[in-house]
Amino acid sequence: MQLNYFNRPYFENGAIKKISEVLKINGIKNPLICTDPGLSSIGMTDKVRNLISEDFSSSFYEETPANPTEKAVNEALELYKTNDCDGVVGFGGGSSMDLAKAVALMANHEGSLLDYSVNEGGYGKIKETMPMVAIPTTSGTGSEVSVGSLIIMNDGRKLIFASPHLMPNAAICDPELTIGLPPVLTAGAGMDALTHCIEAILSPINDPPAEAVGIDGIEKIIKEESLIRACEDGQDKEARWGMMMASTEGAMAFSKGLGAVHSMSHAIGANQELGLHHGTLNAVILPSVLRFNQDHIGNKYSRIARAMGKNESINLATEIEKLNERIGMPSNLSEMGVTEDMIPDLIAHAMTDPSNITTPRVPSLEEWEKLFLEAMQK
């Protein structure tokens, strides 16, 4: 199956076998493949290496951290330049794909990475980057079809980089690459995809097609029980297919924006000592923000409930908490190591996050504090 939305995803079981074809179509002869130590340790990197034709000269950067950093981007960029690469492949979860986007950007842009962050007015500065192909191995971020990248900068801030030019030229979406992913990673990634769908729908931006895509993603994750099934049986190919599609749809949907859940998770995710998983943070924070937005979203909660296959009168926040418990997510931020003394810095970070532009209700300083406290204590 081939889908057409913003870029060109090759979506089917076994799609990874098309990697040489995709590289050739996109004019890449000497790719830098950005991946992480975990995939290298289980032989996934070797699988890609063996599938790429000898007509290509491939280099590998295998040190992508769990939350990609400016330091890692610069290391990978140096390898790119040293080996005369002409394109980038992001192979892994959202971290590897986000790092690959940043490398593709800086490979032909002047100045520092910071210059191109949304916070620094970088959206309009980003021009055409070097060619990039994204290959997700988890079902959560949807980075393979999104225009954004998240990088922790040397100054400690977790910043957003966004531009249509950061959309990968092509995405190879092979659900079989996620077979056997541990339940805890399946759950965290899956809740990332669900949060993308929900926050996109709640965004006040009027974009019915994107909203419809988000509704379909929720149906796949909840109504069809793809997430629960994938967590309970990592070999369930149908569930894995459903989750990868929902992940891709989540990123398509959030072309209309995200909200306060992401502002909060970005703030906490910038703490490299905690090193917390982005999707797991979203899962834990989501119920608190849903309660906060309750009276500011019209009938959208009813629409989301229908997509979940639930009665329209359900308490959506409570349903998410039940789901979190069933799939083994932490019950609060305190369990994850977040402490009250961190809150002032977290608020400062969250208040400047671009996700606030499309949140249905922008919290005040006091409301940010209440949201963080509630997410820590519930």
Image (spheres, rainbow, N blue to C red):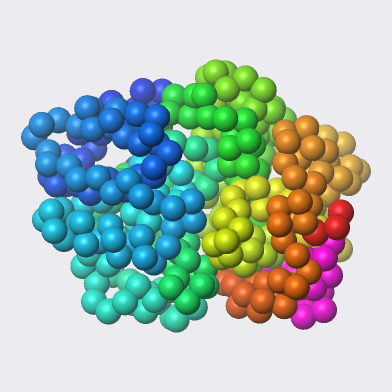
With respect to residue 158, does 306 lie above or below? above
Which percent across, then down, holds residue 269?
59, 61
Which percent across, then down, holds residue 331?
80, 47
Q: Which residues are magenta?
A: 357-374
With respect to residue 102, does 304 lie above or below? above
Q: Quadrant of the N terminus?
A: top left
Residue at image location 75% in from the left, 56% down from the top: 333
* Left or right relative to 166: residue 267: right
Q: Is residue 197 visible?
A: no
Instruction: Pick the residue in front: 273 or 10.
Output: 273
Would residue 97 be counted in the magenta stretch? no
Give the image quarter of residue 227: top right
Q: Which residue is most to the right?
A: 313
Which percent across, then down, holds residue 145?
43, 48
Residue at image location 76% in from the left, 40% down from the top: 324
Would residue 368 be counted in the magenta stretch? yes
**What secondary structure predominates along the stretch shown in magenta?**
helix
